[in-house]
Every structure is written in structure tokens, then in C-alpha cells.
Amino acid sequence: MDSGNEKIRIIGTRALTDRKFVNLFEIRYSDRNGRQRIWDFVSRQNPPKIETNAFDIVDAVIIVPWHVPSQKLVVIREFRMPLNDYQYGFPAGLVDEGETPEQSAARELKEETGLEVTGVRRCSPPIYVSSGLTDESIMMVYVDCRGKPSNRDAGSAEDIETVFVSQKEAGDLCASPDLKVDLKTWLVMDSFAVSGRL
């Protein structure tokens, strides 16, 4: 047998936890040298997508809101437990059963910011943010919105501030070494800072 000429082959998976929103699994696989190995990952689905092949399921939406009256991009500053700090990001949330991603985006934007979606500009296909860690897929939903910020509909475990960002302010946020910024948000803000377009 030639070393390293085999393909990676999945042997099986096993759940390591049983929680409501996210679970830890292990994948048993053989590597290119035929050795058996284990890879740990998390999934919002139970069983995970590797077992069901339901990779068309969108687990969550990331909303990229354009506030039409102010002509500014909307971001949020939210406390994130794993960081023990505030992070700049976009409103986001899980897609509820029976909900389209667009419906989820409108609901989550209202809950987290108090703003109302007035139109959907475009949606990404399902995309993966950290496929070495999780099978979670998200959809980026670009929307127009209106209204005044409010956090009255946010849950008690959510500490969120709504921030309207101009092109210049987006550039300033992206250049700041002291701020924690979500990857997806940084990429969109950086592009907006350079081009002025979403």
C-alpha cells in the first residue's frame, strides 16, 4: 500500500452531549494513510448533518441591515459570553421551524434592534463560517429597514446596543485594534468603508 494515497473516509459519528441548542459529536474516520482517527465538532442539528446529509438546512441568519432614513449601516454591540466582552456584529439568530430565512431575519432584527424590515435586497446561499469546528450553516440576509432603535423585545440574556454606521465610521471601526469585531461584520464593514456600497 502506498502511504498517503488513500482518501479520507468517514467511519461513523457519536453524540457526546444532549443539549437543546448545540451538541458535541465525534467523527471516527480513517486518514490518507489508513489510520483511524477522531475529530470533534459541534452541531445545532441532532443527528448532525453528516448523518442526515441535510446540508441545505440553514441554521441561522446574519442580517445586514441598511437603515434607509439615515442612509447608514446598522451594527450591534453585544455582550458575548465566550469573550467576556462586547463585540461588534450584525443582528443574527436561529431560523425557527417552519420559518423562511427571510422571515427569521425580519423577526430577529425587530427583536434585537426594534427596527422593521422594509425589503430584502439579497440573500447568500448557505455558507459555513467555521467548518473545522461546526456544520452550522448561515445565510447572510441583506435588508432595508426603518424605525428607531429599541431593545425592549430583546431577551433578558441579551445585552445589545444598536449602532448606525456611516462609511467613514465603518472604516474607523475596522481599523481599531482594541475592538472585538465578528469576522462577517468586519468583512462587510471593510467593503462598505472602501466602496460605500453593500
Image (cartoon, rainbow, N blue to C red):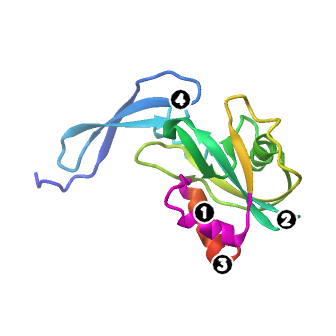
> Residue 51, can we see it?
no
Q: Earlier in the sequence, mark 4 or mark 2?
A: 4
* Circle 4 or circle 1, nearest the eye: 1
* Circle 4 or circle 2, nearest the eye: 2
**Label 4 packing within 10 angstroms: few (<14), some (14-19), many (20+):** some
Tell me if label 2 and label 1 are in contact, CB under 8 Å. Answer: no
* Circle 3 or circle 4, nearest the eye: 3
| Element at label 4 | loop
100 lies above or below 66: above
> Which residue shows up at 50% across the image and 35% down it?
48
Amino acid carrying label 2: it is Ser
Q: Find disc 1 in the rendering and name its residue.
A: 173
Q: Find disc 2 in the rendering and name its residue.
A: 70
> Which residue shows up at 50% across the image and 37% down it?
82
Q: Earlier in the sequence, mark 4 or mark 1?
A: 4
- Residue stretch in magenta: 164-183
Q: Position of residue 75 (x, y in %)?
A: 69, 55
Q: Position of residue 189 (x, y in %)?
A: 63, 65
Q: CA distance from mark 4 to mark 2?
A: 42 Å
Q: Quadrant of residue 85?
A: top right
> Which residue shows up at 44% across the image and 30% down it?
24
Q: Find disc 3 in the rendering and name its residue.
A: 195
Tell me if label 2 and label 3 are in contact, CB under 8 Å. Answer: no
Amino acid carrying label 1: it is Leu
Amino acid carrying label 3: it is Ser
Q: Find disc 4 in the rendering and name its residue.
A: 46
Q: Position of residue 73 (x, y in %)?
A: 74, 63
